[in-house]
Image (cartoon, rainbow, N blue to C red):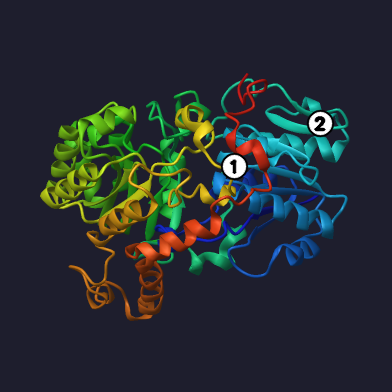
Amino acid sequence: MNILLIRPHPGSDKFGLGPFFRVEPLGLEYIGAALLSKGYRVTIADLRFRPGTAAWVRRSRPQLVGISCPHALEYERIRETAREVRRVSPDAFIHVGGHAAAAFPGPLECDDIDAICLDDGEEVVAQLAEALDKGRPLVDVPALRLRTRDGWVTTPPLAERTSLDLVPLPARELVAHHRSGYHCLLFKPVWLVETARGCPHRCSFCSVWQLYDRSCRERSIGAVVEDFATAGDAIFVADDLFWHNPARSLELAAALKKRGVFKRWILVQTRTDLLCRSSELLAAWRPLAKDFDIFLGLEAASDHGLTDLAKDSGVAETIEGVRIAREHGYGINGNFLIDPDWTESEFHELWEFIACHGLQRAGFTIRTPLPGTEYYNQVASRIAPQPWSNFDMHHLLWEPRLGVRRFFELYTETWRRSILNTSGEKSMLDWMRQVRPSQIPYIARVLWRTQQMMKPSAYLEEYEATRGAVAPCGASISVPGIAESPPHS
């Protein structure tokens, strides 16, 4: 059986840090490895590069097509991709998976899609391929929303969470021809590595913990060391919460040192309160890379703001965690959430917090009710009809308290106080000095694209262009979810 796995182009990235990040489709590489181990012929098509959907379908002649849907903002693009696949290959079985698809599958239930994966795909897609190949009933395949003659049905969940060591290391060779195009911040090419999956916390704006029932699964030390050792010189660790398990994290650092693993750059994601109690861990990991960055969900500049987000930590932990990490020589990146219900005082509070603690390397996103989160359920009735592509954390989904114009004036002023403002403290020339001569065109192009985040007019123009637009998914935007068929019922 020929199987085509597709990473669609996510669409417009006019706002936000999207131009700084284009990482490999690691989930598809893991699914690809699982399918290859079963003897199937697998192709990965990353549509962020040429050629397009039709060319890949004609080239691979697939019986099964899997389309990745990692973010809610891509729902329309996924449907368009499925429609194109159906046009070129009417008999192919089209399956959609990924985080957004599993967390909130409703917008993907259309005639061009045959099934939606409600859990991790490494095990589910392999069983789906086998059922199709051998003519077995698809209702016996677990963790699916399945299109039938009688409508969409949900198959039973997996008996237990898929072990992260169930499949081989990711089949990176399937995207080797795109490797030079994968980049992150100043580094190119970049490899994506996963050591654990899930998060035990309960932030109201996040769907990870709900999808995985606040669990956190880990890969074996040996598998992670092999992955690090065979990956390239710049690594972005994809874990939702790095250093979650202190004992394992120390063991992993020791194993990497024993193997002689040393990288040019590593980026990990974690929480500030975890850093406060992880000085020993930070000391153990710092020697593993020349440059080592930490991305933090900073979220808010006040305890009240963090409490409202169910962050279960305070600004004291933010300040102390940042201090400890810097003491050990880590670079600090992060993100704050800007609430549409803010008054001017909250913006000024944030500006003062950033200046006081030197957090100019942070980004700023609009607090957005992503489908599958508690926050979405709370505010769904406020969301006006609009394309799912607006759920990119840089669009307003309802009228802000300050009014649209004043909100965007203050929001863009916040971005102007960041390191990305080339008219501010760090000029374009300063950025150029940080990269190799061959990478100057890349960084110049990325920075040029991000400068519109400093302009209220750019946001206002976008707001006017999308306000009141009716999404192809219709009323599914304002429905809390598919209550009768949750992913893990």
Q: Secondary structure at mark 1?
A: loop
Residue 58 visible? The answer is: yes
Q: Residue at 23% of width from left, 72% of height from top?
A: 423
The residue where tag 1 is placed is 98
Q: Is residue 412 left or right of residue 141?
A: left
Q: Disc 2 or disc 1, which is closer to the eye? A: 1
Is the residue 150 above or below the residue 177 in the image? above
Res. 4 in view: no
Q: Residue at x 77, y 32 (%)?
A: 146
Residue 364 or residue 214, whichever sits in front: 364
Q: CA distance from mark 2 to mark 1?
A: 19 Å
Amino acid type for the residue under numbered disc 1 = Gly
Q: Residues within 10 Å of mark 2 (few under 14, many from 20)?
A: some
Could you tell me residue 363's position as x and y percent? 31, 53
SS at circle 2: helix
Residue 229 numbered tag = none
Reply above or below: 372 against 290.
above
Q: Where is residue 11, by image quadrant?
A: bottom right
Residue 159 on image: x %, y %: 64, 20
Which residue is identified by label 2? 138
**Amino acid under label 2?**
Leu
Q: Please state which of residues 286 and 117 is positioned toward the viewer in this rendering.
A: 117
Q: Residue at x 39, y 55 (%)?
A: 235
Identify which residue is drawn at 35% across, 70% down. 447
User: Which residue is at the front of the view, 124 or 37?
Assistant: 124
Disc on the earlier residue, 2 or 1? 1
The quarter of the rendered structure image containing the C terminus is top right
